[in-house]
Amino acid sequence: MSHKICWIDNLRAVACLMVIVIHTTTWYITGPMAVTGLWWDITNLLNSASRVCVPLFFMISGYLFFGERSAQPRHMLRLVLCLLFYSAVALAYITWLTPISEGRSLLKMLQKPVFYHLWFFFALIGIYLLSPLIQVKAVQARYVALLVVVLAVLANPNTVDQAVGPFHWLPVNLYVSGDSIYYLLYALLGRAIGTMETAKRGVTPLAAGLFAACVIGITFGTKQALIANGAFNDRWYLYCGPLVFIAAISLLVLFKNALNARTLPVLGTLSRYSLPIYGFHALFIHFLRTRHYDDMSRPLLDLPWVFGVTLAGSLLLAMGLQRLDRRHWVS
């Protein structure tokens, strides 16, 4: 079991870093007039490569709680406490350091998270609630491949429409809709693939190749959408999109096969503090960007600066929080 924990720790840490990359680069991508040309393409590539982060978190949760072990009341309590704690932190930040109406944020907190990144805690509550009802059994790789092709590609509502004349042939309507269905599917596949024998000849390079191909596809599709629409379009970035789906599965297999011997030192530390890092990071980025402690006119300096300060600041707060929160209720 220890080797499985190692690859999960490594994967969780990388997913945590990817979240920071996404939110660091989004300020460039959603405003293409601010940064044009090469740097828009570079940040688009970085963001595209990092879109798998949220699917990976769902897959890790599914691996841990969709087998013999399910989410217990203490896990649900911890998740709710995390939602309340980081919402309170975000509300304090909004009140003291932004012109945003804290009253409106508070009144709408059950329909919309207090701060944008906290939506993940809401989505994870549903996964935890379903956990005791689900125990994924061993399945063959060919079944997983068929499932991915049909549900993640052919019948995915986020697949780009395809038609021959008046005949509309993609996506196929199997009445699979709603992000929650795909979050659950990520969790199910996390358990199925996590317990599957994947270290067969050719699987690891295939997974690496698929991940790279999907990243290129997401990057190219987003750029073409920008050219066609004259404005940023996030269709290719969607966490439930077909290329993001395949990329996430590919990266999970790659880590499971290639990084399962031991937890890498730096990644081990980040994995241990990944929850509070996630909870704090968006506030650092928002503060740096809105208070103009950045320099988007010089992306080569700005991107490492914002990423580094965010990671370092979030990690320090996470370490401090864990010293106070001995039972790890919110850390």
Image (cartoon, helix red, strand yellow):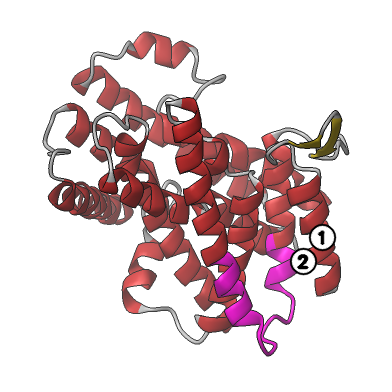
Q: Quadrant of the N terminus?
A: bottom right
Q: As drawn, is 197 to the left or to the right of 27?
A: right
Numbered mark located on residue 68 in the image: 2
- Residue 247 seen in the current view: yes
Numbered mark located on residue 278 in the image: none
Question: Whole-percent x and y of residue 86?
Answer: 39, 35
Find disc 1 in the rendering and name its residue: 135
Secondary element type, mark 1: loop
Question: Whole-percent x and y of residue 190?
Answer: 68, 62
Q: What span is colored magenta in the figure?
A: 190-211
Q: Residue furthest front?
A: 165
Question: Going 56% across and 63% down the picture, which residue do you hit?
Answer: 213
Q: Are marks 1 and 2 in contact (CB under 8 Å)?
A: yes
Q: Mark 1 vs mark 2: which is more N-terminal?
A: 2
Q: Nearer the viewer, residue 39 or 272?
A: 39
Residue 213 to residue 287: above or below: below
- Residue 84 seen in the current view: no
Going by the numbered disc 1, the residue's amino acid type is Gln
Magenta highlight: main SS: helix
Question: Going 58% across and 76% down the picture, which residue do you hit?
Answer: 256
Q: Nearer the viewer, residue 317 or 186?
A: 186
Secondary element type, mark 2: loop
Asked if residue 140 is among those painted magenta in the image, a careful observer would answer no
Foreground mark, 1 or 2, reads 1
Q: Nearer the viewer, residue 107 or 250?
A: 250
Residue 136 to residue 197: above or below: above
Residue 117 to residue 7: above or below: above
